[in-house]
Image (spheres, rainbow, N blue to C red):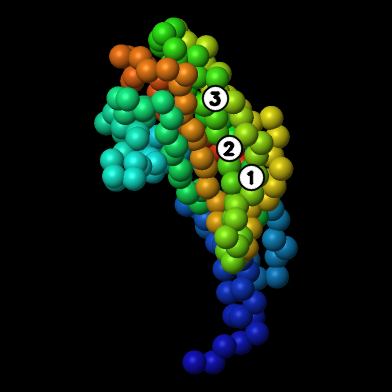
Amino acid sequence: MKITLSTLTLTTVMIFAMSVLAHDKVVVVPLGSKVRTVQQTFTLNLPSSAFIPGVFQTGDPKIYFNVGNFAYLTQGDLIGGLGAPINLQDGAIITNTTCYMYDNSTENFTSPNSKFFLWRQGTSSADYEQITPTTSCSTSGASVTIQDFSVPSITYPNIDNSQYFYGAYVLLKISAQDPLIHQLRFYGCRITYTLDVVVP
């Protein structure tokens, strides 16, 4: 099949447009036209069911899920961690991250050490580095509403999938055991980011 220069140029522009958007939209740019982009804000929601809980050495989970909409520590545990992958497009810029918690017990459920952060790890590295500071989730107890905790800053906001893996980590921790163990709940995280998209 013969490929002319004009066909090749049009194909290149169309592929560029699709790779930049990737949000269920495709902009076809006429041959010879300039590509124009604008920065738009998007949201990635990670419900609690998107997270993988830590386990005991015996293989028993330290976290339970209530029909997938929130997670809580198993009976007898004072601490447990959860992790989830972050899949954002190359070139995305993270602007904010928020963790959602619920705490409706004043008996030992001050949870001053519960925390969360985002991280990245080089594809050829054995170690990770935090891309947000560790944020404390001091729920204070006896709250009948879900509370949100946002990170104060983003250390490495730019997403580069050619160099890094990305993830989120949440740690649930209480000071002492309580029969109402399920009253300290983790509901999920929300990541806000910007992306340059092609417009007609």
Secondary element at tag 1: strand
Q: Earlier in the sequence, mark 1 or mark 3?
A: 3
Identified at 30% across, 14% down, the residue is 179
Q: Are marks 2 and 1 in contact (CB under 8 Å)?
A: yes
Q: Gap between marks 2 and 3, in whole Å? A: 13 Å
* Amino acid type of the residue tagged 3 in the rendering: Asn
Secondary element at tag 2: strand
Viewed as shown, does residue 49 lie left or right of 67? right
| Residue 126 picture location, percent across and down | 57, 60
Q: Which residue is mark 2?
A: 117
In the rendered image of this protein, does residue 16 appear above or below residue 41? Answer: below
Q: What numbered label is drawn on residue 130?
A: 1
Identified at 64% across, 49% down, the residue is 129
Q: Are marks 1 and 3 in contact (CB under 8 Å)?
A: no
Identified at 62% across, 34% down, the residue is 134
Q: Which residue is mark 3?
A: 113
In the rendered image of this protein, does residue 135 appear above or below residue 199? Answer: above
| Residue 125 picture location, percent across and down | 60, 62
* Amino acid type of the residue tagged 2 in the rendering: Phe
Q: Are marks 2 and 3 in contact (CB under 8 Å)?
A: no
